[in-house]
Image (tube, helix red, strand yellow):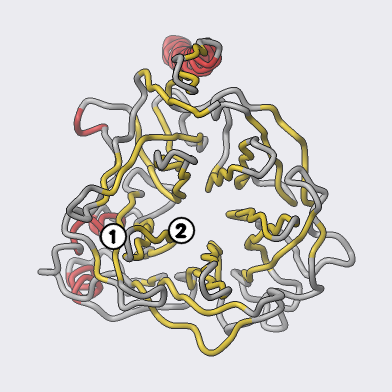
Amino acid sequence: MKQNKTVFDVNIWINLLNYMRNICLSVLCALFLSSCGNGEIKVVYSNPLPVALGDPFIFHASDGMFYLYGTSGEDGFRAWSSEDLVRWKEEGLVYRGATPESWTVDCFWAPEVYERNGKYYLFFSANWKENPTREQENFRIGVAVSDRPTGPFKELYDHPVFDPGYPVIDANVYFDDETGKACLYYSRCCYKHPVESEIAGMAREKGWFDEVEESWIYGVELKPDFSGIVGEPVLLLRPPVRLDDRQSEWESRSVTAREVNRRWTEGSFIIKKDGTYYIMYSTNFFGGRHYAVGYATSAHPLGPFKKADNNPVLQKNTDRGGEVTGTGHNMILTLPDGQMYCVYHGRTAGTGNERVVFMDRMEIKSDGRLTVNGPTTDEQTIFLKK
């Protein structure tokens, strides 16, 4: 027994030292800033970044700073600021929910912040106080506003943006500056949403699960003041129905690995590039090793969307000699010079079950294919315009 405990303690210290090594390497590499003589600054870093968060979101504000938000398990959200995307300063709690005047209760997830007309708008998910049937999952989407990216953010309204009659999470907003319209993208939760499919039938035949619940991604136009929606939500993405669908294998791994009787389609993020809308999304159990990212394309912001043949574009690398699992809930950070980065959370051997932030180069190639150069844990270089 003593020998087993010693081995266990040693493993804990090894994992801790590996994690600290990554943090120290990130800090030291961040200090390696050099001018390239052409208006650029060279920044060297390695993943994971020294911030432990789920569902990370970074935006480049008009003040020239980068701001990072994410899910931390608190009754609200914290922010971090950075000049170079690597050295991050914690700014404290910028939004607090679960107050007497708030519509929220708990489970504050997936914040995203947008700068519009001199204001900063925070979209997020949380459990709603109005719950007469005592549902275990009662998530809705809300919005808060601030004069600064570091808050304090105050809720715009004493109610969620809208109530579709089922739990929803993972808000993402696309602003069309040509039309002046905004579209909200979100995920209907798996909760109480069993769906028949060939995958569900297989799971039942093999004795794995009696049913398989699914989450689906929808899109809908937002009212200009964010007080509600315009029209009815449109179904954009869902897990495959047929076993011979080329997306079926990778999107069903949480079921076939018998992790859980759910198939997710969540964490969407949309951009427009050369007339095409690219929506990235995450699948499989967010707490498992198979969490992964794919994308779909459309000529219109509300679809129809076609899933890409080269999916998944981001997944665990442990079967290729790496140490990263659970890669997902990403967003796309586009720098002023057009460089694109996939920002997401993952787990490593050193961090264990704690979600940490990763940032890897991505691109949309001339043939329209989207690719992500990740997950990485070795040295990476960013060139920032001064």
Residue that lies at the very extreme toward the right in this rendered image: 100
Give amino acid for label 1: Val
Give amino acid for label 2: Gly
Residue that lies at the very extreme toward the front in this rendered image: 38
Query: Residue 21's x, y, as percent?
Result: 48, 12
Q: Does residue 161 appear in this view?
A: yes
Residue 359 horizontal side relative to residue 372, left or right:
right
**Secondary-structure class at tag 2:** strand
Q: Does residue 1 appear in this view?
A: no
Q: Determine which quarter of the picture holds residue 68.
A: top right
Residue in the foreground of this view, choosing between 166 and 260: 166
Above or below residue 106? Residue 130 is below
> Which residue was labeled with disc 1?
255
Q: Quadrant of the C terminus?
A: top right
Q: Quadrant of the N terminus?
A: top left
Residue 333 horizontal side relative to residue 87, left or right:
left
Query: Residue 103's x, y, as percent?
Result: 78, 70
Residue in the foreground of this view, choosing between 110 and 230: 230
Residue 348 horizontal side relative to residue 322, left or right:
right
**Secondary-structure class at tag 1:** helix
In the rendered structure, find residue 267 and report the number of the disc placed on it.
2
Residue in the foreground of this view, choosing between 338 and 341: 338
